[in-house]
Amino acid sequence: MTQESALSTPLEVEELETETVPLNVGPQHPSTHGVFRMVVKLQGETVVDLDPVLGYLHRCQEKLAEGRTYLQSIPYTDRLDYVCAMTNNHPYVMAVEKLAGIEVPRRAECIRVIMDELTRIMNHALLVGFLLNDMGAWLTPVQYGLREREKILDLFEMASGSRMMCNYMRFGGVARDLPEGFLPLLQKVVDDFPGFIDDYEHLLTTNEILRSRCKYVGILPPDRAIAYGVTGPVLRASGVAYDVRKVDRYSLYGELDFDIPVGTVGDTYDRYLVRIYEMRQSIRILKQAIERLKETPPGEIQSKVPKTLRPPAGEAYARIESPKGELGFYLVSDGSEKPYRWRVRAPSFVNLTPLAEMCRGHKVADLIIIFGSIDITMAEVDR
Amino acid sequence: MTFTVPRHDEFRFPGWGLLKGLWVTGKHFVRSYFLRNRRIPGKELFPGGRYGLFIVQYPEEQAPIPDRYRGLPILLYDDATRAELCTACMSCARACPVGIIHIEQGTDAEGKKIPYAASFTIEYDVCLNCGLCMDACAFGSIVLDHNLKTARTRREDFRMTKEKLLRPISYYEKIAPSLWAEMREEALKRLAGTINRRPPDVGRVPRKVAEG
């Protein structure tokens, strides 16, 4: 027998019967970003099926809000997605404004846009860091992200009084005008941030390990993404240019000039890149919003709103592009001071639904990365 | 309008990406020996940009707390007259989303209501630090403290009675000058009216509490 033919004949192995192994990931697991449980069926190292189990962090938030006045629910919206409290306030106050027909002064809109974009930058910087954490680059990238987030949290603390639970927006405007010394610091963040993104990109984007771990892992085709109702950076990474800021043109976004980054493949690498480019676009938006803010007279931050708000009976739905996707609030009023129904359309929850489809056929280690790249906060998923 | 993100599929020298990353971390490593971004009270919040050490040695030094910081609620009284600003109007108790403010209005011998709080309790352990009570108060009486050391060992210690909540106006003026400047005029005008509507020596902080 020649050497060649010896190599090409497979070894004679007795056919063994194989079985799938169920593996329980979570609920208390460092990679699940909260309390989330996945029951994974494994064929060797490969994921065959995945069954998400939700509800460990359920706080009855919607029911709680029905027992409170409209104003008293604002602190509760902060606690939906605790990473980006400002963007949680925004759709809620928009929904109530729609319901009660309240006008918002231009300065308040500028402040809201600034806060929204700062939140987006902060969320993406943090997420990219934690994605690398899941990948095994333990703590170095996330430290850079946390450092930049700290500067933005300082700004939030100056303006609203709290770093994470901001509770800053009110019906018809914002709680207080920007404090003295806020704008120079904001300008500093805006000026410094492109340098930080460059740092991040030098560190990560072309890194061989990151590329080999991320490329073609967890592909979500555009048609499936649309079918699942996925929104936000995950949808845009799949190649669908859908952004509520461009579609609805709410607040000030209609007159601002910015682009939407879109991915081509829809894998984890595209989701990472889309977020990096979104941060750059947010800086562009911030620069324009600051210019517009400077043109408005200081002090005009809230229109007249009755102290006990009793919106007329009816319903309203308001949505914004939160860092995680389309965040919407659906309110039904019966004319009393408390809402009849208070419903949240949480992007984290909807984006989580295609997880099983994205994970099928990948290894267990990839499962953690795919889960991390969707960007979810369990507090928002379970509510 | 929309643009496609570049996926960097072109050929690169193997290891080039790793070297670039090492260059970034190395730059930060070296500069951290020469730059120290101290946060000094009264100075800028984060001087120095992207490089350096961003560390505050907490118990020894403390990062500055902004005026608007929302801590736990406290009650104010006037330094000179020792009169409490609170009139027991209940607007803070109604505004509180978690309902942890319990007020009992004081009455005189005939049972007529007097504008002062006979008892005022806040359950600190449930407080959301949302600041809605402060926004609701028209008298500038309930404000938010800047105290960071709020840990207690027993749950009952979180039930704060009026004696534990009262602080002089001068204290609040020191920690949050800009906020007090906004409400000072209105608060003092209303306080003068409140004192007139109260019998003498009612709703005053005892000298012992005020000094101790």
Image (spheres, coloured by chain):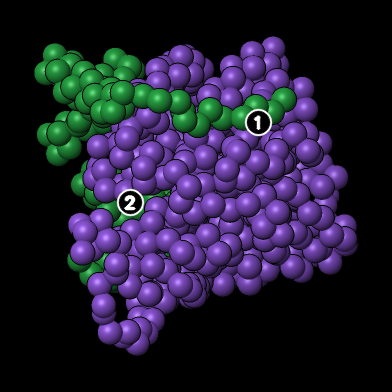
Chain colours: A purple, B green
Q: Name the residue under label 2.
A: A134
Which residue is depicted at the point 42% across and 61% down? A362
How many residues crowd around disc 2 within 10 Å: few (fewer than 14), some, or many (20 or more)? many
x and y percent of residue A304 in the render? 77, 37
x, y (%) of residue A187? Answer: 49, 15
| In the rendered image, the vertical position of residue B7 relative to residue A236, given as above or below | above
Question: Disc 2 on helix, strand or loop?
Answer: helix
Where is mark 1, residue-wise?
A260
Q: Give the secondary structure at mark 1.
A: strand
* Subunit of label 2: A
- A37 versus B130 height, above or below: below
Q: In which quarter of the image is residue B55?
A: top left
Residue B201 seen in render: no
Count neighbours of disc 1 (C-alpha within 10 A) and say few if under 14, some if 14 to 19, many if 20 or more.
Answer: many
Q: What residue type is labelled 1?
A: Ile
- Residue occupying the far front of the picture: A1
